[in-house]
Image: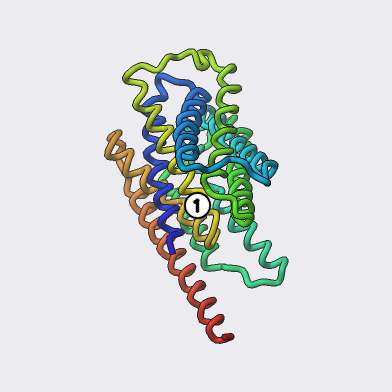
């Protein structure tokens, strides 16, 4: 079962992308970074598609537009929140997505008369508690509106992953789903850059090219892994393993930027790891039970 691998790979790549984003943030505006990240990723993916003889033609164009619009909206809202809330608070709001996913799947199962997967849902809640311990978010006076708007970021991210699931069920390949999402990112970054002081007028310097390449290449690879992870397997397991990005980010911050890791953060990291391990165990046990039931029926 390769599903945990794809999600963990996505977490590592998103961490590297975030490090490159922080590296280049001093030279580029938010939407400029979104534009260059998407354009570089789109170019790399486009070259691979052309070289391998694949096509972006699809029978589900409207489905791609819907998924891309929802996902890009979540990204834009998160960037907006990043400018108005402490980084730790914005990150925490972004990682409410697995909580929305657990609530949605649980309610869906109960509505259909199916047993809810309480162990996996519990693992997601435990992982989010670990995120709170690592990030320790805070909200100052006058920031409550931004927090409420930020909560929609996690909801939209959850919705976007459900759209990925739907497209994958229709046998749309991972690379095509990511292609249209990245194309939407280019459009959103280009349009948003007109509202930034410098826009896209910043000419990449030799020093500034490296972070842009990192953001673009790590970003497209991370998106491919994330889409592959959510495209199949147990969606709650994938959601639980999303929190592993917080662990990699904490380690990256300590190694690359010298940020200290507090005792509560160490406990939070341990809790996230334990929650991910438990989620993998419960998912595997459920899979083995299904295989055993199928064998008994045959």
Which quadrant of the structure image shows residue 190?
top right
Which quadrant of the structure image shows residue 5?
bottom left
Residue 178, relative to residue 166: is it above or below? above
Residue 7, relative to residue 16: is it above or below? below
> At which x and y percent is residue 273?
38, 57
Residue at (49, 28) in percent of width and height: 39
Describe the element under mark 1 as helix, strand or loop: helix
Residue 209, relative to residue 104: is it above or below? above
Residue 261, relative to residue 39: is it above or below? below
In what quadrant of the picture does the C terminus appear?
A: bottom right
Q: Nearer the viewer, residue 58 or 86?
A: 58
Residue 228 left/right relative to 111: left
> At which x and y percent is residue 158?
60, 49
In what quadrant of the picture does the N terminus appear?
A: bottom left
Which quadrant of the structure image shows residue 259?
top left
Residue occupied by mark 1:
228
Residue 108 left/right relative to 217: right
> At which x and y percent is residue 97?
56, 48
Residue at (50, 17) in percent of width and height: 200
Q: Give the class, few, some or many, for how many residues have Cα within 10 Å of label 1's Cα (few <14, many ≥20).
A: many
> At which x and y percent is residue 209?
36, 23
Residue at (54, 76) in percent of width and height: 290
Q: Nearer the viewer, residue 15 or 260?
A: 15
Residue 57 left/right relative to 292: right
């Amino acid at each position: 079962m390769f599903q945990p691998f794809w999600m963990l790979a996505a977490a590592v790549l998103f961490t590297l992308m975030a490090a490159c984003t922080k590296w280049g943030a001093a030279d580029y505006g938010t939407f400029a970074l979104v534009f260059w990240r998407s354009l570089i990723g789109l170019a790399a993916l486009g070259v691979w598609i052309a070289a391998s003889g694949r096509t972006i033609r699809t029978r589900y164009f409207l489905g791609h537009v819907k998924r891309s619009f929802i996902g890009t909206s979540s990204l834009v809202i998160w960037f907006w929140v990043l400018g108005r809330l402490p980084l730790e608070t914005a990150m925490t709001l972004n990682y409410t997505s697995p909580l929305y996913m657990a609530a949605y799947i649980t309610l869906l199962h109960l509505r259909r008369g199916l047993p809810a997967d309480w162990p996996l849902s519990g693992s997601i809640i435990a992982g989010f508690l670990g995120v709170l311990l690592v990030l320790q978010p805070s909200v100052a006076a006058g920031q409550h509106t931004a927090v409420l708007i930020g909560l929609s970021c996690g909801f939209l991210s959850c919705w976007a992953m459900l759209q990925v699931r739907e497209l994958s069920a229709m046998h749309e390949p991972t690379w095509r789903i990511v292609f249209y999402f990245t194309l939407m990112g280019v459009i959103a970054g280009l349009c948003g850059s007109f509202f930034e002081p410098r826009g896209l007028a910043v000419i990449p310097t030799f020093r500034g090219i490296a972070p842009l390449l990192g953001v673009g290449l790590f970003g497209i690879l991370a998106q491919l892994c994330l889409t592959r992870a959510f495209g199949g397997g147990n969606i709650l397991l994938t959601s639980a393993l999303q929190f592993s990005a917080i662990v990699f980010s904490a380690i990256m911050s300590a190694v690359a930027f010298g940020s200290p890791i507090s005792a509560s953060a160490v406990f939070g990291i341990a809790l996230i790891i334990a929650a991910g391990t438990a989620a993998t165990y419960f998912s595997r046990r459920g899979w083995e039970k299904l295989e055993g039931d199928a064998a008994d029926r045959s």
